């Protein structure tokens, strides 16, 4: 079905333009008139389903699943719900993806999860698995899973906003400090060097160090800048290598304090995802796989997939057949706190696993946010101390030769 970009005018003389996915110009005119307007011009666009490499923001994803949940909950069929959003959704990139999703739904027996799965950058495997569970139980269940996805994404947005808010001021201070140090080394010290040379006194060690740094920065600033850019590029290249990225993420999880923040975030997110899938009736193996695909830390992802194998083979409880299987599989990853495992194990044994997972998600979400706030509060103070120390060292290095020259004059 072709896509037309139409120029229209309303009965009160207001002009507007829009894109319509209709069979022909006659159908286009009918669609425009149905909106209370008149068609004054049209252009057929080349169909671009594309969007495979497009990545939607978390806010856009949350809005999309919220609108899908509203329509599906009201009994609107999936294809009609997607068709409505394809034309009216406010984000242009999302509309482009939704056109492809609608085309997939129209020309085959694909489900919504299958169609969204063709856009992995926007809808990773965890989202697809959650929707697939809902599709197996009907429209109401699918609407509930869209609600769950909206809540999960909203949770991630809240965590990200907390981290962004906490890091904004320290980053500003760090940038300001870099500018101050650069200005001092590249501008101030070179202008003071002739004065120091005219004093004809032996320069203290700290003064020689500062002058050496200044000369190095002046002569090699291009090399330093290229080295910084190259380091960032090399890091990104190394992160693309699976073995190295897993090893790096494993080290991050073991770091003092920072590892605790990452572990708390991962625990809260896995608990939130597991709760949604478990509540929808997904089997444990599929749930572990979906949680692994949604995990941002690659070392945790590998560990969850390994634990899935242990769970399905019965190895997770081989030493103690009466132990809670899900809890033991999570314990086998080696990355979940003992308190979280105790809560989940108690819920699993008593039949209250959903409540236990909710409790874990809330507790570790709050704990992660508190640790983030503490970390950046300390980081902020350290940056301030470092700035004061650097400026103080430069001032001292300039002041000492002057004091030595003054003392020599008295003698």
Image (cartoon, rainbow, N blue to C red):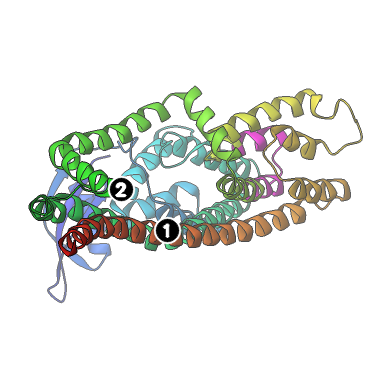
Q: From what the image shows, is residue 286 above or below residue 83?
A: above
Q: Is residue 146 visible?
A: yes
* Residue at 92% in and 35% down: 322
Rendered image quadrant of residue 387: bottom left
Magenta-highlighted residues: 272-291
Q: From what the image shows, is residue 247 above or below residue 385?
A: above
- Judging by the rendered image, the residue that carries numbered circle 1 is 167
- Give x and y (percent) for residue 193: 12, 51
Does the stretch in magenta take in 15? no
- Judging by the rendered image, the residue that carries numbered circle 2 is 93
Q: Main secondary structure of the magenta part?
A: helix
- Give x and y (percent) for residue 174: 34, 56
Q: From what the image shows, is residue 241 above or below residue 324?
A: above
- Give x and y (percent) for residue 165: 43, 63
Does the stretch in magenta take in 276? yes
> Label 1 vs label 2: CA separation?
29 Å
């Amino acid at each position: 079905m072709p896509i037309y970009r139409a120029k229209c005018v309303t009965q009160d003389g207001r002009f507007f333009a829009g894109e319509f996915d209709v069979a022909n110009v006659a159908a286009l005119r009918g669609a425009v008139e149905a909106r209370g307007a008149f068609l004054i011009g049209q252009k057929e666009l080349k169909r671009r389903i594309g969007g495979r490499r497009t990545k939607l923001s978390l806010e856009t994803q949350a809005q999309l699943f919220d609108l899908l949940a509203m329509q599906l909950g009201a009994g609107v069929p999936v294809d009609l719900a997607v068709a409505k959003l394809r034309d009216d959704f406010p984000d242009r990139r999302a509309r482009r993806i939704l056109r492809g999703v609608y085309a997939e739904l129209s020309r085959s027996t694909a489900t919504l999860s299958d169609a969204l799965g063709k856009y992995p950058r926007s809808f990773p495997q965890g989202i697809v698995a959650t929707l697939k569970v809902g599709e197996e139980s009907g429209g109401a269940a699918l609407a509930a899973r869209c609600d769950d996805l909206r809540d999960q994404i909203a949770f991630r947005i809240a965590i990200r906003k907390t981290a962004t808010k906490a890091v904004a001021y320290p980053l500003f201070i760090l940038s300001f400090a870099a500018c101050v140090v650069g200005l001092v080394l590249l501008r101030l010290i070179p202008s003071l060097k002739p004065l120091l040379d005219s004093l004809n006194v032996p320069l203290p060690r700290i003064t020689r160090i500062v002058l050496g740094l200044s000369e190095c920065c002046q002569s090699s600033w291009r090399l330093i800048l290229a080295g910084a850019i190259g380091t960032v590029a090399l890091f990104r290249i190394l992160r693309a290598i699976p073995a190295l990225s897993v090893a790096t993420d494993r080290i991050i999880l073991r770091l003092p304090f920072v590892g605790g923040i990452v572990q708390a975030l991962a625990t809260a997110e896995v608990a939130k995802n597991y709760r949604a899938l478990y509540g929808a009736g997904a089997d444990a193996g599929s749930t572990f796989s979906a949680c692994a695909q949604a995990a941002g830390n690659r070392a945790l992802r590998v560990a969850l997939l390994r634990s899935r194998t242990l769970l399905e083979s019965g190895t997770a409880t081989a030493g103690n057949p009466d132990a809670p299987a899900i809890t033991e599989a999570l314990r086998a990853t080696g990355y979940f706190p003992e308190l979280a495992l105790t809560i989940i194990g108690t819920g699993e044994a008593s039949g209250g696993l959903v409540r236990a997972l909710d409790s874990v998600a809330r507790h570790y979400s709050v704990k992660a946010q508190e640790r983030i706030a503490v970390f950046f509060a300390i980081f902020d103070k350290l940056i301030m101390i470092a700035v004061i120390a650097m400026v103080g060292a430069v001032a001292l290095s300039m002041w000492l030769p002057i004091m030595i020259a003054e003392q020599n004059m008295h003698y």
